[in-house]
Amino acid sequence: MITGKLFLVPTPIGNLEDITFRAIRILKEVDVILAEDTRTSAPLLKHFGIDKKVYAHHQHNEHKAVNEIVRFLNQGQNIALISDAGTPAISDPGFLLVRAVIHAGLTIECLPGATAFVPALVNSGLANDRFCFEGFLPVKKGRQTRMKELVTETRTMIFYESPHRLLKTLNEFKVYFGNDRQVSVARELSKIFEENVRGTIEEIISHYQNNILKGEFVICVAGK
Ligand code: SAM
């Protein structure tokens, strides 16, 4: 029997024009779409005329769901995984499924496409020949340990952060990395109010103490 394929399909992080022709074609061709939040993805799918069965695949059901998804793939179904925005499995559900599909000896294709950390890094003007992606810092347990580990990091570090924790995180960076470390904060990438603020940690803190703390943020911090 011919087995199916798992496609990881990036979706826009703000600007709908950032979906690829291939992403649209794959989403139209697969048998089933797995979405992090079916309600969030519905307008996107409708916009591109994609009318498919969509099932929820999120952090609360992915452990349970992976075996069943592998079974569908084994039966020959082609399946696409999308997240709310950007590339699935990058600070989003997907890793467990990818690992299970590889273990089952089945095929995966991750399409190249939108993700927030690449434009944030490139816009930052910080060294990008070597960098490390830190995603979201742990909220409580392990947070200080992670910060301490990063004190000696020489590569540019990339963090995802929510608006309500941005200032707290920048203030902690000040303690661990010092006032003068260069930082770049990308806000609302690819959207109407996109903004990239660059400077020392101290300057960035003062900017965000006096400006809007709304939207989505990526923080890039120069290495030591
Ligand atoms: N899978 C996504 C990716 O490929 O980038 C990341 C999903 S993660 C749950 C969401 C975080 O990504 C946000 O909190 C923010 O840090 C970052 N992000 C997503 N879209 C963004 C945007 N348009 N501008 C800035 N940051 C963004």
Image (spheres, rainbow, N blue to C red):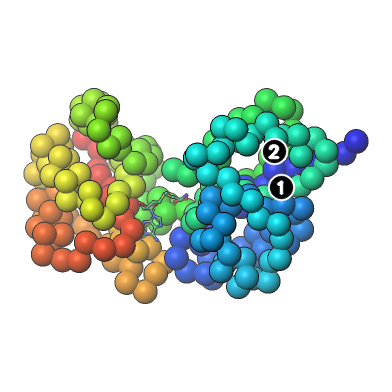
Whether residue 157 can be seen here: yes
Whether residue 124 can be seen here: no
Judge left or right: residue 142 versus residue 172: right
Measuring from the top left, give residue 61's x and y in whole percent. Answer: 55, 39
Instruction: Tell me which residue sits at (31%, 55%) in the image.
Output: 217
Instruction: Tell me which residue sits at (63%, 36%) in the image.
Output: 65
Disc 2 from disc 1: Cα separation: 8 Å
- Tag 2: amino acid: Ile
Judge left or right: residue 94 versus residue 120: right
Instruction: Tell me which residue sits at (69%, 38%) in the image.
Output: 69
Judge left or right: residue 32 versus residue 197: right
Helix, strand or loop at disc 2? Answer: helix
Crowdedness near tag 1: few (<14), some (14–19) or many (≥20) residues, C-alpha within 10 Å? many
- Determine contact: label 2, label 1, CB under 8 Å: yes
Crowdedness near tag 2: few (<14), some (14–19) or many (≥20) residues, C-alpha within 10 Å? some
Measuring from the top left, give residue 103's x and y in whole percent. Answer: 67, 25
Q: Quadrant of the N terminus?
A: top right
Helix, strand or loop at disc 1? Answer: strand
Measuring from the top left, give residue 45's x and y in whole percent. Answer: 62, 66
Res. 79 mark: 1
Res. 152 mark: none
**Nearer to us: label 2 or label 1:** 2
Q: Is residue 11 above or below residue 97?
A: below
- Tag 1: amino acid: Ile
Foreground pick, 155 / 25: 25
Judge left or right: residue 38 versus residue 176: right
Corner quadrant of residue 150: top left
Q: Earlier in the sequence, mark 2 or mark 1?
A: 2
Foreground pick, 84 / 148: 84
Q: Quadrant of the C terminus?
A: top left
Residue at numbered disc 2: 69
